[in-house]
Image (cartoon, rainbow, N blue to C red):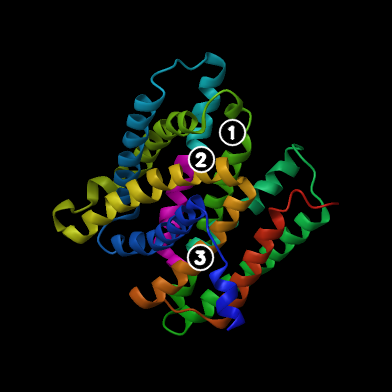
Amino acid sequence: MKAVEALSKIHFSAIELMLFLLVLIWGLNFVAMKWALREMLPLAFSTVRYSLATALFWAILFAREGWQPVSKKDALKLLGLGLLGNTFFQAPMIIGLDLTTSGNSALLLATIPVWGALIAVIMRIESLNRWIWSGIGLSFLGMVLVTLGSERAFALNNASDATSTLIGNLLTLIAAASWAGFTVFSKNLLKRYSPLRLNALTMLPGALGLWLFAIPDVTTQDWTAISWQVWLIVPFSAVLALVVGYIIWAMGVKQIGAARTAAFNNLVPVVTFISAYFTLGEPVSWLQGLGGAIVLVGVQLTMRKEASA
């Protein structure tokens, strides 16, 4: 009875409810993309999805802020950020997803704050306290357990599946590190550009770079063999997961702060693991579950930048 009374007193704000919706969208998006990769080559799917999202971002930018010229000083920085945070994030992410499970992909991408903290230290942008170092250590321990658990789960069926999963995990971690670098290096530019403008400006060169990587997949893809269900996944993944997802995330950061907003991202792998188990039949070993829990605790500690040293 007391538990029911306690639950009845819990009230969520509008933005918190929207962030829970975003968790559901992002969690299901990994499963949806994995489903689409049954019929589409990884980079062919990613290029179509990302091009659509880029076009929508530019449409929203023109509608809300209009066109403003970019300074020559920032042009090369925006180009580099676009390639780092988009091309070199999207390409290894989608290829990694094709090779590993959607649950692993969601979980390993949740380590982005960990890589961001490490990059900030390496670049001497900020120092870390003991809580953050503890979080980094726990995250890496959890990643090792997730990888070992994946290999055990797939080795029961085929040794080559275990190898592919390992490669997929590594590519996903490269993607996470790329996005972390984008986040760290974009901080100064965010002083001169709105988040919407910065994302639109960096997504355009990122999309063009992605097209260059995707030429082999785009030219060999049998576009007539794609089912209507997969064609529905493309706008879901582009419009809801990328465009709407960004808008909700930006609103969350503005209204409740970056730390509280980022905490919602820890729920994404949970949604993905559960939905992937029931829809895709992806195996989940106890070692993966333990490693995943350790990763999420580590990520939460890593985000405690306000903790005392």
* Magenta segment includes 31: no
The N terminus, quarter of image? bottom right
The Cα atoms of the two marked residues, 2 and 3, are separated by 21 Å
Disc marking residue 186: 1
Please say if the residues under marks 1 and 2 sit with CB atoms less than 8 Å apart.
yes
- Residue 120 % position (x, y): 71, 42
Q: How many marks?
A: 3
Residue 269 - label: 3
Residue placed at 51% from the left, 57% from the top? 172
Q: Are marks 2 and 3 in contact (CB under 8 Å)?
A: no
* Left or right placement of residue 233 versus residue 54 in this view: left
Residue under the point 62% across and 65% down: 296
Q: Residue at x 59, y 33 (%)?
A: 186
Q: Looking at the image, is mark 1 or mark 2 nearer the viewer?
A: 1
Q: Which residue is nearer to you in this view: 197 or 142? A: 197
Q: Which mark is residue 85?
A: 2
In which quarter of the view is residue 190 placed?
top right
Q: Residues within 10 Å of mark 2 (few under 14, many from 20)?
A: many
Q: Nearer the viewer, residue 303 or 161?
A: 303
Residue 78 position, x and y percent, is 51, 27
Q: Which residues are magenta?
A: 85-104
Element marked by disc 3: helix
On screen, residue 186 above or below 152: above
Chief secondary structure of the magenta span? Answer: helix
Nearest the eye: 220 or 267: 267
Is 93 inside the magenta-drawn segment?
yes
Amino acid, disc 3: Pro
Residue 119 is situated, as x and y percent measured from the top left of the image, at 68, 44
In the figure, residue 135 lies in which quadrant?
bottom right
Question: Which numbered marker is on residue 276?
Answer: none
